[in-house]
Image: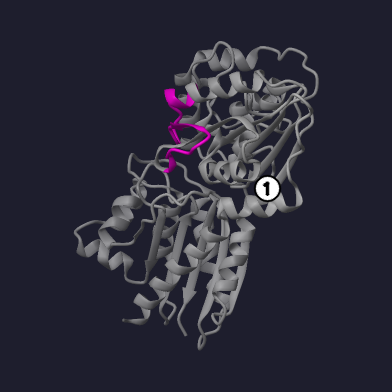
Amino acid sequence: MTVVEALRERAKELFSAACTAADPAHALRAALDTNPPPRPDPGGSYLLVAVGKAALPMAEAMLGHLGQSAREALVITNYENARDLPGARVIAAGHPVPDENGARGADEVAALLSSATGEDRVIALISGGGSALLPAPAEGLGLSDKAEVNRLLLAHGFEITEINLIRQQLSRLKGGGMLRIAAPAPVTAYILSDVIGDDLRVIASGPTVAPIGTRAEARALLEKRGVWSQLPAPVRAHLERARPDEPPSPQATNILIGSNRKSLEAVAEAAAGLAPQIVSDQLTGDVADAAKIVTDSVRSVPKGRAACLIFGGETTVTLKGDGLGGRNQELALRVSLSMPDLGRDWVFLSGGTDGRDGPTEAAGGFVDAGTATRIRAAGKDPDALLANNDSNAALAAAGDLLVTGGTGTNVADVQILLLGP
């Protein structure tokens, strides 16, 4: 095995450690040791709603904790992660593009929550992906309207906080909607963060917390970014209407059980002996800028010893072509094309901890100094593919796609740069 081959295998092992650290069942059980849900009042019972890519393992762990106490449990997750779960109804729905199954699941969530009484206790299990998996269009909007808004926001490089500010204004469940529907039942939420900085208003668009902003702020942002005129007419009409006065969202107990930072720390622990260093847990913004941060980071690492540089975050891609890929694949491709000649072996991995990067089967990519050569040897032009946002085809040609399958968790993205001596 060559040095590069060994580094590639080690990079995959370290990425696996990142995903294991975010195991939703383990994280939830640990949280329940210190923060169990309050017991229902006499005559009441537990109502359990789990939403997101990690919904199933979280629901399974919670049902194990509650025993036979749950009156009803409803799980909404993505198709790849869906499976039967005794004691719960499981609905598989579309991600990242919302679909009719998600809309049906949202209606069932709303119906279950509206049945809650003051004696009941609602438990919400929230994880990344919940925004797309639980589309509940506001009155006057259709699922196609929300899908088109989602497409436009992704195509124009909106960051996750901006996206969820807008999503919350178009939904019955986001931005504290679950709390309003469940009232007067108290709500306890256990949250696995896929958002850098762990802003609870942003994770799954904050169904159990106050909204990020207002309709007016959402409209101002869309106008500033030049997207307003492209929105479906019903969406523009909805955002132009003054929001009826509403009382503040009911309070909830929100408990954060896992995050990207915890996964980066797990990588550092697993990389002992490689001088691990968490360079940034805020690798956000445009993917081209993120690639430069990665390639610039090698300047501080002297030759003569191996090193492991660790990053975490969630970048954005501005679509300029019609190719297929995702932010992790494009970041990996950009690094492979812009990394200076280091005079040493290196491998860079960028992957989504949920095992899915964009609308592809890959979690991301892992590249080395020979990536561009392998792409050209396959008869393709890596620069042209990059210009067309076709990172998936480029990395496939090089044999550099990172394919893990669904991991059952989602704590944003992890990047690992391994340097040989």
Is residue 194 visible in this depiction of the protein? yes
Vertical side of 278 occupied by 325: above or below: above
The image shows a total of numbered marks equal to: 1
Identify the element where label 1 is drawn. Answer: loop
Q: Is residue 239 left or right of residue 8?
A: right
- Residue 216 location, quadrant: top right
Is residue 283 visible in this depiction of the protein? no
Residue stretch rendered in magenta on the structure: 81-103
What residue lies at 51% left-to-right and 42% top-to-bottom? Answer: 56
Pointer 1 residue: 198
What residue lies at 53% left-to-right and 62% top-to-bottom? Answer: 18
- Residue 82 location, quadrant: top left
Q: Is residue 233 left or right of residue 45?
A: left
- Residue 123 position, x and y percent, is 67, 35
Vertical side of 254 occupied by 114: above or below: above
**Structural crowding at the residue carrying mark 1, measured as other residues with C-alpha within 10 Å and reported as few (<14), some (14–19) or many (≥20):** some
What residue lies at 40% left-to-right and 37% top-to-bottom? Answer: 79
- Residue 294 position, x and y percent, is 52, 64
Q: Amino acid at mark 1?
A: Asp
- Residue 33 position, x and y percent, is 72, 53
Q: Is residue 212 left or right of residue 75?
A: right
The N terminus appears in which quarter of the rendering?
bottom left
What residue lies at 69% left-to-right and 41% top-to-bottom? Answer: 200
- Residue 333 position, x and y percent, is 39, 58
Magenta run includes residue 95: yes
For the rendered model, the colour scheme is one colour
Magenta run includes residue 17: no
Q: Residue furthest bottom?
A: 304
